[in-house]
Image: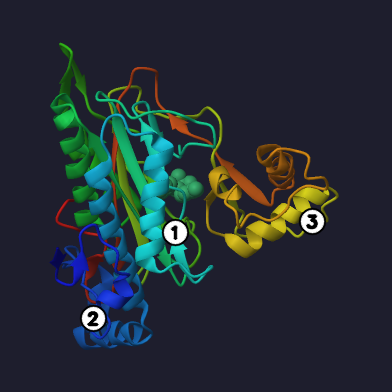
Amino acid sequence: YVANGQTEPPTIPIFELYKNKPFPVGEIQEYTQDFNRSRITNEEKMFLDGKIGDTGFYETVREASEVHRQVRSYAQSFIKPGIKLIDMCEKLEEKNRELVQERGLERGIGFPTGCSINEVAAHYTPNCGDNTVLQQGDVCKVDFGTQIDGRIIDCAFTVAFDHKYDNLLKAVQEATDAGIRNAGVDVRLCDVGAAVEEVMESYEVELDGVTYPVKCIRNLNGHSIGQYQIHAGQSVPIVDNGDQTKMLEDQMYAIETFGSTGRGHVYEEGECSHYMKNFDAPRVPLKLKSAKNLLAHVNKTFGTLAFCRRWLERDDGGSFTVNSLQGKQERYITGLKNLCDAGIVNAYPPLVDSPGAYTAQYEHTILLRPTCKEVVSKGTDY
Ligand SMILES: O=S(=O)(c1cccs1)N(Cc1ccc(F)cc1)Cc1ncn[nH]1
Ligand SMILES: [Mn+2]
Ligand SMILES: [Mn+2]
């Protein structure tokens, strides 16, 4: 059937769906603290906002957000115990490509589909050959991105099938919402962290007879987002870390919080799947032919967007070897290590709390517009 023009499951690209209509506006929040913003009049704020609007920036971000909402709604219908994580990611990514009407670097997937499980908090997506299956008792963080013109929507939610985790998920959803409410132009980053921490640590969760306080994972944070740059330099803490840096007007932010029943601290651990070119990569001469070929492929296919090993094996993958006798996997592993050692590509290994811990995440992308705060990725689900 068709609901407001879209099929079920969704198959019509969002651009087509809104052919001559404006894309849906995100959730609008007024700024609470009006620090030195009173230095500019409302007329000036509206003028600035209108100028940005005229560039098409808001329409671009709102289109990508609607793609994200429809992709995650479809994903929520098939993310069930027994599904192979690799199939889950590929099905979600295929729909993401379809609804954004993928076109090279102009529009497509923003970064790898994270599906980190239990004590793994972030940056896990299966590499080829990983046959991990989602289980009934798992807590899975689904974190994926959609980008148009390099404007990346970074938005994530947690899936758990056992209601024993309800309080953990509620703590994190409320903490992320508190972070979003406290964000604003000229707001100090540490004050956002403090607001998150206060909400998160007001929750506890009872699992199998043991009661755990929900802890913020203090070394994970949200971040500013730039064009084709998922992390644009500012980190938004989820605890009060004393960072007096102020949030910026006209800046996009990912506000994400993580709750844990474990240490509340993650380490980089396990096989890496997530990689991304250093935004300010040095131009160094490469000796290895496979590295040279791989870098050419990365520049063409991903640019400065994050990618994962699985995507290097997609049939549009270039030829990274001198001899094609090597299997697909070996073809790029050596080259990839060479690019990382040369400081051209950074590796982002899984971020893991203590064994037996359960971690949850919620994340939205927000715009600090001159006139208001817009939670562009807000949906009816979260
Ligand atoms: O942890 S981050 O590296 C970070 C750096 C400084 C502050 S937050 N990171 C950005 C990123 C890095 C590599 C990726 F492949 C994808 C994303 C946050 C994030 N991961 C998923 N969603 N949001
Ligand atoms: Mn994310
Ligand atoms: Mn993020």
| Horizontal side, residue 364 vs residue 164: left or right | right
Name which residue type carries label 2. Pro
Residue indicated by mark 3: 284
Residue that extends furthest to the front in the rendered view of this protein: 1
State which mark lies toward you, 1 or 3.
Answer: 1
Gap between marks 1 and 3, in whole Å? 28 Å
Gap between marks 1 and 2, in whole Å? 22 Å
Q: Earlier in the sequence, mark 1 or mark 3?
A: 1
Q: Residue at x 40, y 40 (%)?
A: 87
x then y, percent, for residue 104? 53, 68
Q: Earlier in the sequence, mark 1 or mark 2?
A: 2
Name which residue type carries label 1. Ile
**Callout 2: CB less than 8 Å from ligand 2:** no
State which mark lies toward you, 2 or 3.
Answer: 2
Q: Depth check: 61 or 41 in front?
A: 61
Residue indicated by mark 2: 22
x then y, percent, for residue 144? 38, 51
Q: Residue at x 28, y 73 (%)?
A: 369
Residue indicated by mark 1: 109
| Horizontal side, residue 288 vs residue 232: left or right | right
Name which residue type carries label 3. Val
